[in-house]
Image (cartoon, rainbow, N blue to C red):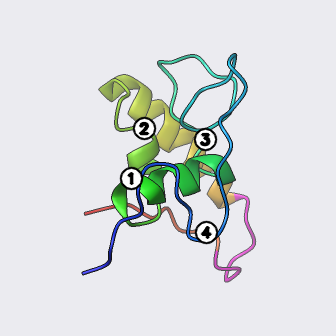
Amino acid sequence: MKAKLQEGETGGFILLPPAPDKCQACATAHDPSLPHNQQSLHYQYWFYGREGRWPTWDDAMAHCTPEMKVKTLRALDEILRKQPAGDGHNQRKTHT
């Protein structure tokens, strides 16, 4: 079993807090009803520090309504369809 990092630890550097006007989880300006920015390095390390694993888009939208999750997944699918085949970035990872 992996040892979880303590809040704020990242295994070698300190994760500085986001600006007060940004989301404190992903350091991005977004409406609280929207998913966190799963691609944000701040969110990735913040999440890893709490959960001991890297976040998925499902994690980033766990707080969202079912309707927002559907909209987000549709948008992600559209983006991923535009990626060249075989580049390794055309799959939506989920946590099961």
Label 2: state its secondary structure.
Answer: loop
* Spatial separation of the CA atoms under disc 3 and disc 1: 16 Å
Percent coordinates x, y for residue 79 in the rendering: 67, 51
What amino acid does circle 3 point to?
Answer: Asn
Q: Are marks 4 and 3 in contact (CB under 8 Å)?
A: no
Query: For mark 2, does the 10 Å Cα neighbourhood hold few (<14), some (14 to 19), or many (20 or more) residues?
Result: many
Residue 85, magenta (yes or no):
yes
Percent coordinates x, y for residue 57 in the rendering: 47, 50
- Marks 1, 2: nearer the viewer: 1
Decide which of tag 4 and tag 3 comes sooner along the chain. 3
What residue does disc 2 label?
61
- Residue at the (67%, 83%) spot, across then down: 86
Percent coordinates x, y for residue 9 in the rendering: 52, 58
* Magenta stretch in the rendered image: 82-88
What residue does disc 4 label?
90
What residue does disc 1 label?
50
What residue does disc 3 label?
37
Decide which of tag 2 and tag 4 comes sooner along the chain. 2
Q: Are marks 1 and 2 in contact (CB under 8 Å)?
A: no
